Amino acid sequence: MTQQFHVLVVCSANICRSPATAAGLARAAAESGLPVSTASAGSVALPGRPACDLSMALAGFHEYEHSSRPLTADLIGAADLILALERANSAAVASLDPAARRRTFLLVQAGLVGERITQTLATGTLPQGAPELPTGAVARLRWLVEEMDAARADIPAEVDTEVPDPHVLGYERHPMSAETMRTAVERLAATGEFVLRMPGNT
């Protein structure tokens, strides 16, 4: 069985933003040939609730089977990369597993940081201080997470990197949230694909 790079997406109730993002990322990874598996959970989720039909439809999924689940330390521990939709969600991750901070990002933040790393790699150089690219797809994606952690401060503090909950702010926010999530997922998938295509030495 092919080794997989595991991504955990975390929102609040695990019925809207995180399942849509996880499904979209899984689709993008498959289209890009990335060995990525995705899962989702909610920082205040009740178990067994279906996904929001509107959120899933806006992400391009219909009749999507999903059962919400609470965030746990085991889920965090199994993840190579954790994507949170809001700071409260990333704080919940850190409270359960402080060591996971370095591989936990806000979704939008991760997309922007990944894009910057791609731009650097496209010049034929590695990010400053980065080790050589390893061999193996999963090892390279883990290398990418380490470089994303090193570069996270490059995103200005005034940049809005949260995806607010449409179920809190109003259903009319669903399209805006869906577009924000889709853009971030596309950036991440493009970054992962670029890193896997890079030659061994740069």
Image (cartoon, rainbow, N blue to C red):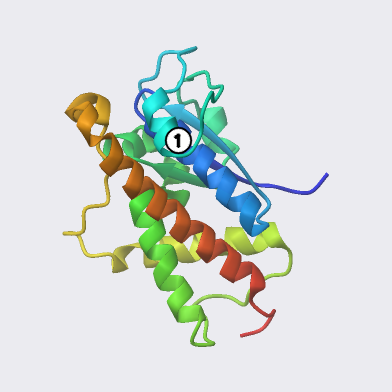
The residue drawn where x is 45% and y is 52% is: 185
Residue 181, image x and y in percent?
37, 46
Residue 39, image x and y in percent?
55, 34
Label 1 neighbourhood size at 10 Å, few (<14), some (14-19), many (20+)?
many
Question: Closest to the observer: 50 or 134?
Answer: 50
The residue drawn where x is 29% and y is 39% is: 175
Is residue 148 found left or right of 89 in the rendered image? right
Q: Quadrant of the C terminus?
A: bottom right
Residue 176, image x and y in percent?
26, 43
Is residue 97 found left or right of 143 in the rendered image? left
Residue 49, placed above or below residue 179: above
Residue 122, placed above or below residue 174: below
Residue 55 found in image quarter: top left
Question: Closest to the observer: 99 or 44?
Answer: 44
Q: Is residue 81 visible?
A: yes
Residue 170, placed above or below residue 2: above
Is residue 54 found left or right of 118 in the rendered image? left
Is residue 87 found left or right of 59 in the rendered image? left
Three-letter amino acid code at the position of disc 1: Ala
The residue drawn where x is 37% and y is 28% is: 54
Q: Is residue 96 visible?
A: no
Residue lying at the far right in this picture: please name it. 1
Question: Closest to the observer: 61 or 128?
Answer: 61
Q: Which residue is mark 1?
A: 20
Q: Quadrant of the N terminus?
A: top right
Secondary element at image label 1: helix
Residue 136 found in image quarter: bottom right
Q: Number of marks in the image? A: 1
The residue drawn where x is 52% and y is 18% is: 67
Residue 8, image x and y in percent?
51, 39
